[in-house]
Amino acid sequence: MRLLNKNKEDALSTRISLAGVLDHKKVEIQPVNLFREFLLIDESLKNMLGKVASNHVLEWRPAEVYTIINGETRNYDLNIQSEIDDETETRNEAESSDTEENEFAAEEQKKSGNAPLIEKVKRCLYISTLSTDVTIIERKGGIVRYEGEEKLLDQYLELTVSNDKIEAFIRKKKELKSEIVNLSSLLYFLKKKRITYGIISDEEIEKWLMESTPEADEKPFVIARGVKPIAGQDGSVNYLFRTDYTNPGKIMKDGSIDFRDKGDMPYVNKDTLLAIKTPFKEGISGVDVFGIKIMPQEPFDPPFTSGNGTIISEDKLQITSAANGQPHVDIMGNITVNDELVIKGDVDLKTGNVIFKGNIVVNGIIKEGMTVKGINLTAKEIEGATIDLKGDLNVANGISHTTVKAVGNIHTKFVNSSQITGFGDFTVEKEIVDSNLILSGSCNVLRGTVMASTLNARKGIETKQVGTIASKPSNLVVGTDDIADLMEKKIDELLEEGRITIDKIRKAMNLLNGEDEALFTQITESAHIQDRALFEIEELKKQLVRHRESNDNNELKKVAEKIKTLKERAHSAEDLINSLFEKQGVLTAKRDKLSLGIEQQEKKNMVLLKEKRIIGQSIRMMEPNPTVKVNGTILQGSKIIGPGSSIVLEKDYSRCIIREMAKDEDNPHFFEMEIKGI
């Protein structure tokens, strides 16, 4: 403390100079460092005078430091010396004076009582500068970087970064002073702003610093450029058979379908090459101006799997038919070659449920309570059944009180009180009544009416009529990812069930492991008993020899009895060990079975995860169409819902298109429904 006091005494008796401050801080005396120190003192002085003004409730108008130091104080009310003296004296009396620092401050206050105000300010500021720890960030080439210098540079420079962070721009906010803004300080400024990659050359920076025209000052200058990522190449599949065949049959004048007239159906023989896959190519990552890697968008890897009646090559890039039949590919990328099963009558209790890995043709009706699973299904009518297909569904008359899941397209005359999920397009000749449909494709009601139903079609809805005076309003949902969300939710539920199953199996395996450890302990103990008995028998046999030589019959008899007992003990231990080994074998078989169960469940989970990935890539990548087209009339109360907006119609509209549109082209995140006439 005495040393500090001594420094302060020396400071007050020393001629005040910036060079002295730099010398005290052990900073090389250069013009740029002198100017920076000057600006630091400038800032400190303004802060100090601001505090004085606020303490004395005075109006504070900041002045340039050189104006005050040179005594040019016109237009500034600085006649507050007596107030400062009084305030200082009052505070010194109120504070504890038991430290040498306070004693020194009081003494100096007395010494400088008659000094001019500006001289007091200068000396106090100089002492403060000498006794304050200044954080020096960097010394390089004689140039010193102080903490807080970035704020000083902020007064002259404005930095902005593009939205993709590939370019950084700098702009002059006011005329630059070379002592403050130069190549060295600008590079330091960029470093503090975390701009580390793609900074332009020193020559380009210096050229920009030298330019001083209004146009050059206002225009943002590219100070750093990152590297944009290069997108990869999507994979593709070339199908060598007709994949767009959707002809259910010839449509008659009355709207019915003649399924016998299907035209040219695709058909292949065994060993026919069906499809060739071109694999995707990875992209190349980029780097932004902050030095952070930018990953390219993941390329599309089209699903490509071999199903019933097909074989995939070792390199997984070709699929060939393994039988004669009708080729088919579903939305999950599963390619099959299928036989055809024809049922001449109805599907009822006599036929039982129909589960067939191929195409099914039912000439009659699929009755209530029955289940049909296959690839493509053609039927006269469906009443109260459950349908699960990997391909298309074609129904001559209609679908009533039925649950349908079809990966392909659906074509029918009418739908009544049914739940339908489809991953292709849905076409209805006449009407949809009191039903729920969720589709990844489009929904077309060609000549009929939608009544009291909810239709959800990612690729839009086209119908003649929506609603009647007597029916409840319908909800029309278009352009959403609801079907993908529904499928992913179902897959997540199955994955959770699989996880629970694996946990249960592992708990059962832990119990078996506990039993196995107990058996191992018993086996070890029994083996020890057996080994000990056999060892004692060998020792007793040696005694027998000695007792025979001495003709000691009594001892011979005793030893013989002991040997007999030990042999029985060893045999019992051996029997127990064999029994325990058998139990161990049973436990091992059970554990192997449980391990197989875990392996099978994990394979199922892998398939589910693959399906989930395909859903994300295939369904979500389809271009949505949030549009409802009405060729007739849509009644008041009908609700149209899009991905970002919805509307309930307050009146009837005829021949119109209702489409979700962005409210503002410059802000594509806000939408509204637009109604236009056809």
Image: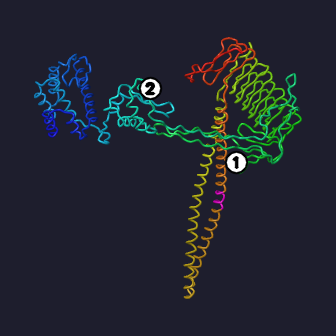
Circle 1 residue: 316
Q: Nearer the viewer, residue 565 or 90?
A: 90
Q: Position of residue 190 (x, y in %)?
A: 40, 35
- The answer to which image quadrant residue 120 occupies is top left
Q: Position of residue 599 (x, y in %)?
A: 65, 50
Task: Please say if 134 is above or below 71.
Answer: below
Circle 2 residue: 219
Q: Nearer the viewer, residue 109 or 232?
A: 232
Q: Position of residue 673 (x, y in %)?
A: 63, 18
Badge 1 amino acid: Lys
The tally of labels here is 2
The residue stretch that appears in magenta = 582-588
**Crowd around label 1: few <14 · some 14–19 · many ≥20 (10 Å):** some
Q: Earlier in the sequence, mark 2 or mark 1?
A: 2
Callout 1: SS: loop
Magenta segment includes 1: no
Q: Is residue 91 left or right of residue 414?
A: left
Question: Between marks 2 and 1, how big is the CA–CA gap?
Answer: 55 Å
Callout 2: SS: loop
Colour basis: rainbow
Q: Nearer the viewer, mark 2 or mark 1?
A: 2
Instruction: Name the residue rendered at 62%, 65% in the picture.
Output: 577
- Quarter of the picture holding the C terminus: top right
Mark drawn on residue 155: none
